[in-house]
Image (cartoon, coloured by chain):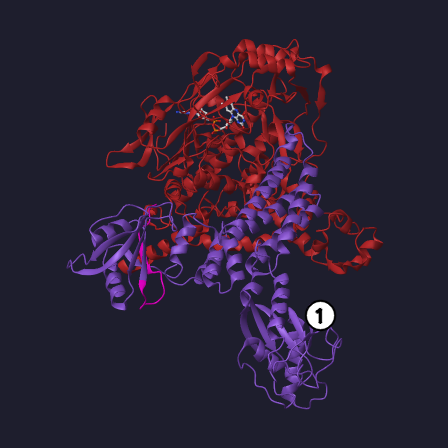
Chain colours: A purple, B red
């Protein structure tokens, strides 16, 4: 694996900490270790070594050392991990010692992963999955990211790519050889059927829930007339004073968004301005317009107004709030009864919301698709539809070529530099 | 005898003649050296020119005012448009040639070039001066005469170290009955050039008088009157029929009985043969379950009784060949005049060539044709054109005409050869051209003749004709920019959707049911048919071409990023060993070319890009 540079970076969190892990990857990784530790321990076994400055021979630290010979490593190169004592000065001293080697330099953001990608250790989707995994805060995010990082998605795409190659080959045989007397075939049927089948598969994949929901959280919107108790309920749901509560109708004029994780699912609770038609206050009116927009975008709508008078929404939950007060709306037994004041019914509501949310998210055994992946899958599906609509072999071949381009772009076999930068820009140094 | 030239071309085949002719048209002093004057322009194998992908090459060479298109028309005894039922972009014009007429046309065309000298003899060695061991100074002939020049183009076909095989027989030669270029081969091998072996084969020639034609299905020439060259307005030679026979179970049994005596299967031939044009024994061995393979019986000429059986190229022993032929319908009594054979020859790994086919590491040395690992007359002719223009441009310090993958099959081939190399004899296929929707055989002139004229490669006659056509073309294009409504078309009886609105005539052409003839039916003016057809096809695929434009622009941007031929790829971090090897072998000229090399990933490209930028900054800072 000929790489000129050997890169290193602190791969654990910022010091001070109990331990700090320094990674070194590249052709000189073992040489550097040899000079620092005076020996290169046997591969894949934790060994305690004394690290010394190669110049002064002064001791830098006692470290636990792991040696991974390439190419079967995370980066595809020779890789060393130094588990140091996590003090700032220790880390700085070891970094300076490594940096003094010719050809060694600090890694750029995402560079370890980039090398893994370059050396064929992972493709673009796996790299994205890894970024998601590192960023995952909830259990469901972690599961989806693992799925992507683990290569299940890439395997599916690779299977499609093989399908397209096979279809393209049939088409090309028809174009380049059929008139030379030696191709006998029913290729047209094979190709039309093959395109339709592949298109179905891709459409199915496209129906997977968007990954963004998993990351940013499902929108849970609280809506209802002014003073129906939305803000009180919000505070009770998120467990802190996120919204200002007063008895004056129209206190919440703009939307308040609070992200929380409930039962491993990321949710974004949104409190809205109360809905009323007669407000003369310009600012309040703007707030009300925004409320309407928010209700449209809601994944789940908690309706605190009169039963049956909420907007039409596939996931509307009727809430009977202020259940402890006389003024509470009387709703039928289907509604959830809560009292934000006493806390009665709040945890039950959270559980119901989380359960409903899970039905809207990719199940744990399926992957979620992000916007980048969606664009290319859409392109592929569109081109496959066009294949089915044309009788001209040339057009079919051209559309199949477009499908190949789209799938290649998806796995990073072919794409532009800025895309790479976007993907790798998401990593912090050391990964 | 003159002995000093600008360019010396070795080889009077399809590559050599085009190279010599284009350099002479551009105005340089050229010598064409070949073993036998009378064999210049000979067709070594089948008497056909053109076909799928290959027909495109012929039209493109013709667009540069080359020889092969005109010679084809001057010799054509049979015209056929392959893929006639498919889109125009993949239609392949093909002709059957009378060998003698073809050769005669090539020789006449060469004879009309005043600054072209034909020299008969063997090219024994490249000539170098002692103080410049890599700068070509001329050529040493077999009789030790030295010709001097600034550039030499090698177009020696199958003659470099050529060896013939037939059953147990072995002969030295490039074609049956002709010498082999052994001396030159030795020198080149000594010069550390990457040389390997390939093989190809040819079928037996049959005596047409012993064939029972009454039992066979005929294939007549096309009725249309299209020609190969835009400088030939009509078909001038009487047309002949081709006929079709088939191999059968008995034929296959006979072939199997001889396999152990075939040099191919006995392991005597180390070179790889063409997958797309396998010998009949290969076909039987690999596709044994097929009931039969079609065999086209093609006449070799008007006054020749020789018949070329296309599809049964073989190096089986003579007795097996005879039995095999006689097992087929219509051939029960057939006599073989010349048995088939295989030829194995040296080729140079084309990855050591740049895009003008110059050999890297030498000054003034070019290679073209089968020597570069290709197969076929058309492929050879197109490379001859490129090498001839390359050498001429270099001498005149002019830029090469800007051919690239988006404007010609010629460039697709050169790019494939010089970047990917070959593992078997390379043959043109339309599938190789990713932008083939715009590379039709009917628009080769519009695509390429303007740049050919700028390069000075076009003689006066064609230049005048082309200017005239350009005027007509732009007149027709402006006519097609006029708009017409769906209603008006429906009134005229053209089946379009009522709600399609109003658009230009050109835009209407994207609907397959709308023809240009219908659109212009009411015009008083009449346009040349070929021009109408060309613009109709431009309209058909216009939306697809527009969609490709973004892709092509991306590529153009990467073409601006030059890569030094001296780049040390092993010093770039993040390139695998395999990538370094491939990049170092073909030394891409720019980033776009690098991206096309098999196995080069986008991430690797990014690394190359960063390295190239750093190197450039270093150069600027050093200056
Ligand atoms: C037996 C055989 C079978 C073939 N089968 C097929 C096939 O099935 N399909 C297909 O597409 N193509 C086939 N071809 C290939 C086709 O004929 C060639 O690709 C094409 O002719 C190559 O053109 P060229 O200009 O490179 O070389 P050629 O046409 O071979 O011309 C080479 C010329 O160089 C001259 N020459 C060589 N060395 C010297 C020297 N040292 N000094 C002087 N003169 C020299 C020769 O006399 C000759 O004139 C076959 C060729 C042969 C010989």
SS class of the residue under badge 1? loop
Spot occupied by residue B409 in the image (x, y as percentages of width and height): 54, 41
Which chain does the residue under circle 1 lie in? A
Q: Identify which residue is drawn at 77% across, 60% down.
A: B501
| A321 and B40: which is toward the camera | A321
In magenta segment, residue A3: yes
Q: Which residue is mark 1?
A: A313
Label 1 C-beta lies within 8 Å of the nearest ligand 1 atom: no
Would you say the magenta stretch is mainly helix, strand or loop?
Answer: loop
Q: Is residue B207 visible?
A: no
Q: Is residue A102 visible?
A: yes
Q: Is residue A389 above or below residue A310?
A: above
In the figure, residue B347 lies in which quadrant? Answer: top left
Q: Residue furthest left?
A: A56
In magenta segment, residue B185: no
Spot occupied by residue B458 in the image (x, y as percentages of width and height): 52, 42
Q: Is residue B400 above or below residue A207?
A: above
Q: Which residues are magenta?
A: A1-19
In the figure, residue B188 lies in which quadrant? Answer: top left
Q: Is residue A212 above or below residue A253?
A: above
Q: Identify which residue is drawn at 71% across, 18% down.
A: B216
Quarter of the rendering occupied by the N terminus of chain B? top left
Answer with left or right where residue A152 lies relative to residue A309. Answer: left
Spot occupied by residue A279 in the image (x, y as percentages of width and height): 69, 89
Quarter of the rendering occupied by the C terminus of chain B? bottom left
């Amino acid at each position: 694996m000929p790489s000129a540079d050997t890169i290193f970076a602190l791969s654990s969190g910022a010091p001070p900490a109990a331990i700090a892990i320094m990674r070194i990857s590249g052709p000189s990784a073992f040489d550097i270790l040899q000079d620092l530790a005076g020996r290169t321990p046997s591969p894949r076994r934790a060994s305690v070594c004394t690290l010394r400055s190669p110049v002064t021979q002064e001791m830098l630290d006692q470290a636990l050392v792991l040696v991974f010979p390439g190419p079967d490593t995370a980066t595809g190169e020779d890789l060393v991990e130094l588990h140091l004592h996590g003090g700032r000065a220790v880390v700085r001293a070891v970094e300076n010692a490594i940096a003094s080697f010719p050809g060694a330099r600090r890694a750029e953001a995402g560079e370890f992963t980039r090398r893994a990608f370059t050396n064929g250790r992972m493709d673009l989707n796996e790299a994205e999955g890894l970024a998601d995994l590192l960023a995952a805060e909830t259990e469901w995010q972690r599961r989806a990211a693992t799925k992507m990082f683990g290569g299940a998605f890439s395997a599916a795409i690779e299977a499609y790519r093989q399908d397209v190659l096979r279809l393209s080959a049939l088409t090309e045989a028809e174009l380049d050889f059929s008139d030379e007397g030696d191709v006998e075939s029913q290729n047209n049927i094979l190709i039309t059927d093959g395109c339709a089948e592949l298109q179905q598969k891709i459409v199915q994949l496209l129906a997977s829930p968007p990954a963004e929901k998993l990351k940013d959280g499902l929108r849970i919107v609280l809506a209802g007339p002014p003073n129906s108790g939305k803000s009180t309920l919000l505070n009770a749901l998120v467990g802190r004073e996120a919204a200002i509560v007063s008895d004056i109708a129209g206190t919440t004029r703009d939307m308040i968004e609070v992200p929380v994780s409930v039962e491993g699912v990321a949710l974004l609770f949104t409190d809205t301005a109360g809905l009323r038609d007669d407000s003369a206050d310009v600012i309040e009116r703007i707030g009300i317009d925004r409320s309407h927009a928010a209700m449209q975008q809601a994944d789940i709508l908690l309706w605190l107004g009169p039963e049956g008078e909420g907007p039409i929404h596939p996931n509307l939950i009727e809430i009977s709030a202020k259940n402890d007060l006389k003024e509470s709306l009387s709703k039928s037994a289907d509604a959830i009864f809560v009292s934000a004041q006493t806390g009665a019914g709040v945890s039950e509501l959270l559980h119901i919301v989380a359960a409903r949310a899970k039905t809207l998210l990719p199940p744990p055994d399926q992957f979620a698709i992000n916007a980048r992946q969606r664009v290319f899958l859409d392109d592929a599906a569109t081109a496959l539809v066009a294949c089915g609509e044309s009788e001209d072999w040339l057009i079919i071949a051209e559309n199949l070529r477009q499908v190949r381009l789209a799938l290649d772009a998806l796995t990073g076999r072919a794409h532009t530099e800025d895309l790479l930068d976007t993907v790798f820009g998401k990593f912090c140094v050391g990964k | 005898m003159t002995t000093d030239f600008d360019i010396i071309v070795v080889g009077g085949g399809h590559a050599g003649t085009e190279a010599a002719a284009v350099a002479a048209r551009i105005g340089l002093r050229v010598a064409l050296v070949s073993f036998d004057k009378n064999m210049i322009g000979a067709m070594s194998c089948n008497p056909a020119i053109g076909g799928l992908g290959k027909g495109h090459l012929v039209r493109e060479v013709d667009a540069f005012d080359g020889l092969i298109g005109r010679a084809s028309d001057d010799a054509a005894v049979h015209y056929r448009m392959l893929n006639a039922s498919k889109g125009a972009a993949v239609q392949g014009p093909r002709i059957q040639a009378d060998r003698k007429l073809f050769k005669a046309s090539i020789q006449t065309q060469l004879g009309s070039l005043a600054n072209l000298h034909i020299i008969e003899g063997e090219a024994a060695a490249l000539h170098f001066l002692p103080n410049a061991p890599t700068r070509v100074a001329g050529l040493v002939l077999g009789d030790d005469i030295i010709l001097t020049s600034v550039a030499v183009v090698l177009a020696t076909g199958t003659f470099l170290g050529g060896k013939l095989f037939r059953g147990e027989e072995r002969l030295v030669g490039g074609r049956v009955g002709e010498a082999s270029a052994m001396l030159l081969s030795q020198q080149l091998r000594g010069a550390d050039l990457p040389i390997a072996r390939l093989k190809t084969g040819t079928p037996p020639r049959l005596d047409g008088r012993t064939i029972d034609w009454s039992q066979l299905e005929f294939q007549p020439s096309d009725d249309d009157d299209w020609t190969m060259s835009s400088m030939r307005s009509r078909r001038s030679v009487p047309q002949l029929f081709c006929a079709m026979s088939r191999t059968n179970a008995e034929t296959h049994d006979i072939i199997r009985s001889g396999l152990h005596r075939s040099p191919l299967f006995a392991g005597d031939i180390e070179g790889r043969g063409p997958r797309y044009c396998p010998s009949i024994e290969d076909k039987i061995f690999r596709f044994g379950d097929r009931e039969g393979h079609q065999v086209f019986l093609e006449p070799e000429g008007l006054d020749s009784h020789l018949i070329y059986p296309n599809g049964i190229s073989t190096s089986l022993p003579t007795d097996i060949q005879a039995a095999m032929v006689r097992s087929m319908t219509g051939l029960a009594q057939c006599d073989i005049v010349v048995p088939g054979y295989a030829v194995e020859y040296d080729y140079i790994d084309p990855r050591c060539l740049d895009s003008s086919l110059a050999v890297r590491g030498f000054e003034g040395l070019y290679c073209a044709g089968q020597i570069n690992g290709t197969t076929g007359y058309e492929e050879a002719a197109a490379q001859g054109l490129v090498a001839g223009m390359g050498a001429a441009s270099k001498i005149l310090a002019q830029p090469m005409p800007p051919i690239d993958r988006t404007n010609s099959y010629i460039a697709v081939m050169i790019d494939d050869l010089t970047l990917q190399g070959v593992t078997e004899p390379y043959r043109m296929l339309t599938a190789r051209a990713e932008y083939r929707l715009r590379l039709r055989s009917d628009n080769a002139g519009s695509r390429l003749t303007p740049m050919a004229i700028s390069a000075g490669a076009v003689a006066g006659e064609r230049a005048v004709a082309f200017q005239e056509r350009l005027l007509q073309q732009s007149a027709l294009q402006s006519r097609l920019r006029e708009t017409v409504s769906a209603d008006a078309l429906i009134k005229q009886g053209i089946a379009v959707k009522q709600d399609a609105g109003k658009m230009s005539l050109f835009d209407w052409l994207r609907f397959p049911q709308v023809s240009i003839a219908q659109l212009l039916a009411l015009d008083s003016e009449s346009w040349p048919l070929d021009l109408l057809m060309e613009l109709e096809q431009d309209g058909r695929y216009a939306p697809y071409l527009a969609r490709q434009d973004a892709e092509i622009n991306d590529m153009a941007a990467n073409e601006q990023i030059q890569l030094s031929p001296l780049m040390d790829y092993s010093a770039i971090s993040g390139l695998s060993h395999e990538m370094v090897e491939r990049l170092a072998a073909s030394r891409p000229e720019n980033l776009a070319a690098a991206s096309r090399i098999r196995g080069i990933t986008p991430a690797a490209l990014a690394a190359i890009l960063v390295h190239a930028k750093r190197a450039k900054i270093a150069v600027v800072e050093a200056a």
